[in-house]
Amino acid sequence: MLSAWNINAQAPPPTPVGPLNSDVSPPRMPSEVKKLAAGEFSVDSKVGWQQTSLSLQQGDKFKIKYVSGTWTVDFRSFTYVGPEGYTPQEDSQIFQFCKLDSSWVYGRLVGKVGNGAIFPIDRGGSFTANAGGELSLRIHDVDACLVDNDGSIVVEINGKEKVSPGSQFQFDDLPVKFSKISSVNWYGNTEFAYKYRDLYYRQLRGLHSGLDFIVPGGTPITSTVNRNGTVISVNNQPLPNDWGAGPSNVVVDYVDYIVLYGHTSPTDLPSLGAPIKPGDVIAHSGTDGNTYHLHLEVIKKYPSPAPGTKPGNIRTNPVLFFSQSDQNKMGTKAKRAGDGGIFHTPSPGNQWQTPEDQPDIDPVCCDQWLVP
Ligand SMILES: [Zn+2]
């Protein structure tokens, strides 16, 4: 539990413990410098928050494991300890006003994700991000009290843990190595989609229902979803069902979500019913007749509201299912919702810009084939 202590507030100046010279430096130990292995991160006890390269979305799972090292919050007076920090007995001997959380012992390894709540890590374990952003690590000791610290702790960070099927739908990576997101057509009520609402975007009444990755023709499209899927439509077969992503597309059912890979090349298409595993190349990018790109749609499946009636389905913003680092690769065009300045602004009631706001689309034309 977090105390009411505001970690962003200026810490009270510590009462000096023992002689504090302007030149405070610990005795140098024989060199412990060791090359860090991949995934390892060294946390310096003399520095405050240290940002790792792990970028997380709220709810993402990650692992941290203690590898080596010790540190101290006062090299003159107290022992060197591991990432679990001091024993309560030794901790009670230490000046108490340099704590981020008054209920925690000094010397613990602690972390935070973005601006989320700080959490203890100690010797490590499995964690769930309580906020989105970069993972940062530090010793439990406020910034103003770091001057007499010494030592460092090396940890191994694993944020690429595969989520088992049945857990939250997400993309573990981009489906294509792409050069950019289309400047005219990311997701939602774009000006382009509105302009051509009676032509290309008629079915969704002016909503661009996917995300366009500009890639050269023939670029492999990989299944990067964190689970297995099944090909349920190829080139609008078995049911003639133009989702607005013609002339050809491949649709994969991932149980609770469906992904439509639009404008695929007519060569090297998978067969209907083909199983899709993470990492499989599904198809190659083609053209809509004007530009080569992958049109990616994520469609949430809903059960049929009543026997014999059409199940609902909702196009959602694909951006929401990618990690923050993948979103960064997409650039500023990867709008998370309808917050783009050049989005078309339709009348209230037709602003289909967040997943919750998506319409259950035209009941006659487009999703009959979802009936079990
Ligand atoms: Zn598109």
Image (tube, rainbow, N blue to C red):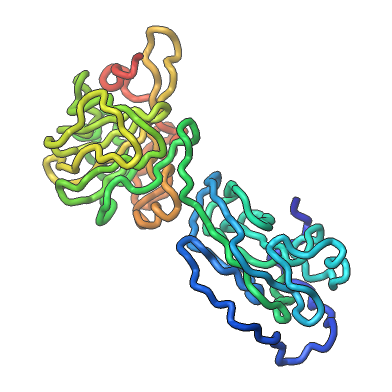
- Asked if residue 15 shows in the view, the reply is yes
* Residue 79 spot, x, y in % from top left: 78, 73
Q: Which of 257 and 247 is in front in this view?
A: 257
In the rendered view, would you say 265 is above or below 22?
above
Whether residue 189 is visible to the viewer of this picture, yes or no, is no
Q: Position of residue 365 (x, y in %)?
A: 26, 20
Q: In which quarter of the image is residue 10?
A: bottom right
Where 148 falls versus 37 (above or below)? below
Q: In this view, does 294 lie to the left or right of 188?
A: left
For residue 299, which quarter of the picture?
top left
Residue at the limit of the structure toward the front, as seen here = 30
Q: Position of residue 96 (x, y in %)?
A: 84, 69
Instruction: Residue at 41%, 32% (x, y): give it.
Output: 358
Give the residue at x 39% y 49%: 335
Q: Quadrant of residue 290?
A: top left
Image quadrant holding the C terminus, namely top left
Q: Pinpoint residue 238: horizontal percent, then vertical percent.
A: 21, 19
**In the image: residue 138, left or right of residue 313:** right
Asked whether 79 or 176 is in front, the reply is 79
Using the image, determine if residue 254 lies above or below residue 4. Answer: above
Residue that appears at 53% across and 65% down: 41
Along the horizontal axis of the image, is 47 left or right of 249?
right
Circle count? 0
